Amino acid sequence: MLAALIIGFCFGFFGSIPVAGPIAALVLKRGLDGRFRSAAAIGVGAAFAEAGYAFLAFWGFATYLTRYPIIEPLSRTFAGAILIGLGVTFARYKSAKLGSAAPGADSPGKSLLLGFTITALNPTFLATWTAATTTLYSSDLITLEPNDAIVFSLGALLGIIAWFALFTGLLKRYAGRFDQAKLARVVRGIGVLILLLGVWFALKAFLYFTGRA
């Protein structure tokens, strides 16, 4: 069980480092705006949703989802709408002064729910964790049992939270030293990528529902 916990933690921590995803972009944007509690809460919400995907993939539940093919296009529809909205917001981003957000504008509960929802509606996480667990099983480096799924997903949860806590902490400590103009361009660039990803999700869903997939 300890091995499953450690491996899950490493997968969660290092798998969350790329900053091109919608959750990382949200955390980055709110951190640069001085909304650090909101940024941290978004990361925690995303961690719980992604840990759920890690559990399903490790336990092998992904095979059962194939019995209900409507789930994937529906999730892509919702994910596409959310990502397009986020992409447009980020693409229009302008740097803000630290602490400029209105008091109470980002409650931890709403931010946590936002992070959870965006991640839960993104079906690519199931594919990512399925690939990761398949690789782990086939490596023969360690023997893991299906009963370790809960411990593995707990490790993933802690790893993801640890990364976003570190990321938020770095933003809080060093945000004032960053070139705000350059960072604004980075956020806008990420916004364009997220917008394209949202369009891709929406297109896949459209092709499915029109019988062209």
Image: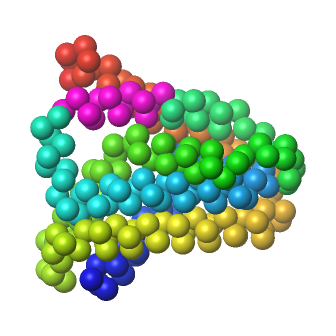
Residue at 51% x, 32% y is: 82
Q: Classify residue 28 as left or right of residue 156.
A: right
Q: Is residue 18 above or below residue 68?
A: below
Give the image location of residue 106, x and y in percent: 72, 46
Give the image location of residue 162, x and y in percent: 54, 72
Quadrant occupied by the N terminus: bottom left
Quadrant occupied by the C terminus: top left
Q: Residue furthest front?
A: 109
**The residue stretch that appears in magenta:** 69-81
Q: Residue furthest top?
A: 210
Q: Main secondary structure of the magenta part?
A: helix
Give the image location of residue 33, x and y in percent: 78, 50
Give the image location of residue 5, x and y in percent: 34, 79
- Along the line of sight, which residue is nearer the eye, 172 or 41? 41
Residue at 35% x, 56% y is: 52
Q: Residue furthest bottom?
A: 2
Q: Classify residue 213 as left or right of residue 170.
A: left
Residue 171: quarter of image: bottom right
Residue at 38% x, 27% y is: 77
Q: Is residue 33 above or below residue 14?
A: above
Report the number of numbered marks.
Answer: 0
Residue at 18% x, 77% y is: 144
Q: Is residue 53 above or below residue 84?
A: below
- Along the line of sight, which residue is nearer the eye, 168 or 148? 148
Q: Classify residue 4 as left or right of residue 146.
A: right
Residue 38 shows in the view: yes
- Along the line of sight, which residue is nearer the eye, 102 or 185? 102
